Image (cartoon, grey):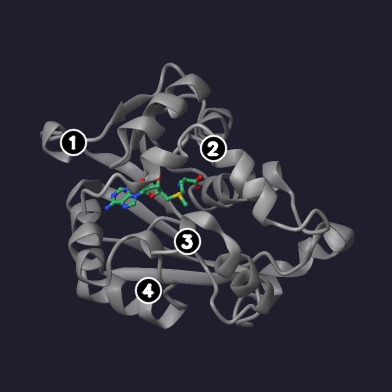
Amino acid sequence: MNKPEFDKFADEYNQVLGETIPDALNEDVYFAEYKIALMASRLKGKKITRILDFGCGAGRSLQFMKNYFPDSEIWGYDVSPESLKVASSQLPEALLFSDWSTLGDIQFDAIIAANVFHHITVAERLPALVLCRKSLSAEGQMFMFEHNPYNPMTRWIFERCPFDTDAEMLNLSTALDLARKAGYASEQHSYTLFFPKQLAFLRKLEPWLKRLPLGAQYYVQMAG
Ligand SMILES: C[S@@+](CC[C@H](N)C(=O)[O-])C[C@H]1O[C@@H](n2cnc3c(N)ncnc32)[C@H](O)[C@@H]1O
């Protein structure tokens, strides 16, 4: 669980990602923002005092978290200290840490893990998800966003991405099984990212497609 293998990609994380995704499909900002926008809409009306980006990496989501949750404390955790240095430049006020044991009794009203669990070894995924559950407040919500291995374009990019050589994608049913085993009392889920930017006008239809296993990613929202 403590392998900081992303240290070596920290400085050029965004550049490598940009080079891996074909130009016709790449929407750097949209890919980072849509997860936070979706999470914000799912949490509408809830008081979010403290929010954690679990596996925040180079901090691509942090500024969006600040924009969508302006009154919340923004925290970021990652096993890669070098990535945290880059993340700190994205949002200097974010509270970043790489040693979970320093957290003490701090609890979060929301935690997001965006494209992190496929980098955690199969054996370490359940303990990581339990760790998140134990750090949620009573009404706290956990969001896991992951690549959908059934989407051919996702597979194509995954197989070419230098970050992903040691990674292993998990499908939605594996993620749901993990959520249950980790002790979450309830979950909701949906496939996402069905349309490339050329068909962006169709994205408003995505909520009706949520059960169709063709989106490039999916999320699982867990509570309890
Ligand atoms: C593909 S990057 C995603 C970074 C960020 N969430 C984003 O959306 O840009 C995966 C990140 O997960 C981190 N990571 C891997 N194993 C982890 C673990 N057990 N706990 C926390 N972070 C981990 C890596 O260091 C890396 O920064």
> How many numbered circles are shown?
4
Where is 37 relative to 160, above or below? above
Residue at x 89% of width, y 60% of height: 198
Residue topped by disc 3: 164
- Residue type at the position of mark 4: Ala
Q: Nearer the viewer, residue 224 or 120?
A: 120
Residue topped by disc 4: 175
Q: Mark 4 against mark 3, which lies toward the viewer?
A: 3
Sequence-first tag of 4 and 1: 1
Give the structural element (helix, strand or loop) at label 3.
helix
Distance CA(mark 4)–CA(mark 1): 25 Å
Q: Is mark 3 within 8 Å of ligand 1?
A: yes
Mark number displayed over residue 32: none
Q: Nearer the viewer, residue 134 or 100?
A: 100
Distance CA(mark 1)–CA(mark 3): 23 Å
Residue topped by disc 1: 99
Give the structural element (helix, strand or loop) at label 1.
loop
Q: Mark 4 against mark 1, which lies toward the viewer?
A: 1
Residue topped by disc 2: 60
Distance CA(mark 4)–CA(mark 2): 23 Å
Q: Is mark 2 within 8 Å of ligand 1?
A: yes
Categorize mark 2 by other alpha carbons within 10 Å: few (<14), some (14-19), many (20+).
many
Sequence-first tag of 4 and 2: 2
Residue at x 56% of width, y 59% of height: 161
Check whether the beta carbons of the residues at disc 3 and disc 2 lie within 8 A of each other: no
Determine if residue 49 is in view. Answer: no
Distance CA(mark 4)–CA(mark 3): 18 Å
- Residue type at the position of mark 1: Asp
Residue 139 percent location from the top left of the image = 29, 50
Residue 183 percent location from the top left of the image = 20, 69
- Residue type at the position of mark 2: Arg
Categorize mark 3 by other alpha carbons within 10 Å: few (<14), some (14-19), many (20+).
some
